[in-house]
Amino acid sequence: MVDDSAVIRQAISKMLTVDFDVAVAGDGEAGWEALTKAPDVGVLITDIEMPRLDGYAFICRVRASDDPRIRELPIIVITGADDDETKTRAFACGATDFITKPLNLAQLQACTQAYMRFERPVSEEAASHEGLLGRRAFEEQGEALWRGASAQHPLTLLLATLDRVRVLYREYGDEQIETIVRHVATVLRDEAGEEAAAVGRLTGVEFGILVNGASKGQALALGQRLVGAFAHHPAHDGKVLSISVGVASSEEGAGTFEALRQMAEERLKRAVALGGNRASGSALSDTLGGAEELVLDGVAPPGSAESEAEAGSEVTFEPEFLPEPAVVGVFAGAEPAAGPRQTLMGLDRAFCYVADGRGAELEPFLDLLTSEVTVLLDFLNTRRRLGLDTAIAALRKSLRPGTEIQ
């Protein structure tokens, strides 16, 4: 636990020593030194505003470590700054979770317990019981497929995680939470089906899917389908779960399978930071700049050209405890699927794809995007009296049955 306040360090130590051994440090430099010497750290908790090495730079250094033990630690940020700017920068640097002061004991304990349990690698034996590969076998398969990947035969990696883990952990406890996670594993395995070259359980709540020979657009469509599947496959008690998915392809220039994994991990973090229940083919840094840029340059002052240019890339975050996710319309084929359905791609992401020259990747989502544009135009037409009735009617006519958002 890293914080420059002795009072906070003492308070958190007292809170957590009931369940854990707690090591403390007064700033990022001291925290880094402690991490390199302590082989069994399971969770890192850090403040943001600290001398010598602040929380942003500290997180960046951890995520850039050559040691996987350090690089992959879950990082819980605690700070008195309850604003989106701080959260955005922390998530862009690689934070796993965010808690604001004053600290709530139950919240902090549940958060720490959840990440201690679920961020560690799962044994090969445990994964095989669910019909999945363990982390080592999955990575070996990924390396083998990577060697055979080419421009004509790309390899795509999807990383998926269960949303709101700490909330579910508080609700279900140690015994029942594993049943929930196994349900997630089963749905992912069954829904990926023959499209997947391999499906693995990498940590307690993170899963990997390898798709061989499919484009990134096709893999992203699979990711969206996996997200939507949970609306039709509730848990044993009827609860509708949700997942986040990050998608990365060898088409995008990764030099190694590990680089591909890191790319997918960044995109998974973006999906989580945007509230979960979605698949993402781009990272926070794609719209916010890289983590080091954020740390060194900060955020442009309001009113500047830079801040105005970034205004369209605002990132939202989910509150500590949310009701079940609201379900909205979805892209559908000629036959509408029964039951609730999930959104595939928002207009904000589509604009970024077009601006980046990646419009071809929007092909699977054109009906959905047309439907969303139609809803927006209809609203503007009514409010501003723009006389667009004929154009809106033509857009609606172009949609395939079952596509339109009501």
Image: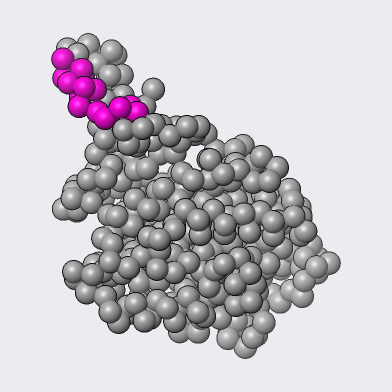
Q: Position of residue 229 (x, y in %)?
A: 49, 45
Q: Quadrant of residue 380?
A: top left
Instruction: Tell me if residue 199 can be seen.
Output: yes
Depth check: 312 or 80 in front? Answer: 312
Q: Position of residue 299 (x, y in %)?
A: 37, 54
Instruction: Tell me if residue 303 can be seen.
Output: no
The quarter of the rendered structure image containing the N terminus is bottom right
Name the dominant secondary structure of the magenta segment: helix
Please, is residue 331 above or below residue 151 in the view? above
Residue at the image position 43 percent from the left and 34 percent from the top: 337
Q: Quadrant of residue 6?
A: bottom right
Q: Which residues are magenta?
A: 390-404
Q: Position of residue 252 (x, y in %)?
A: 25, 67
Q: Is residue 28 left or right of residue 159?
A: right
Q: Position of residue 109 (x, y in %)?
A: 74, 59
Residue at the image position 22 percent from the left and 11 percent from the top: 385
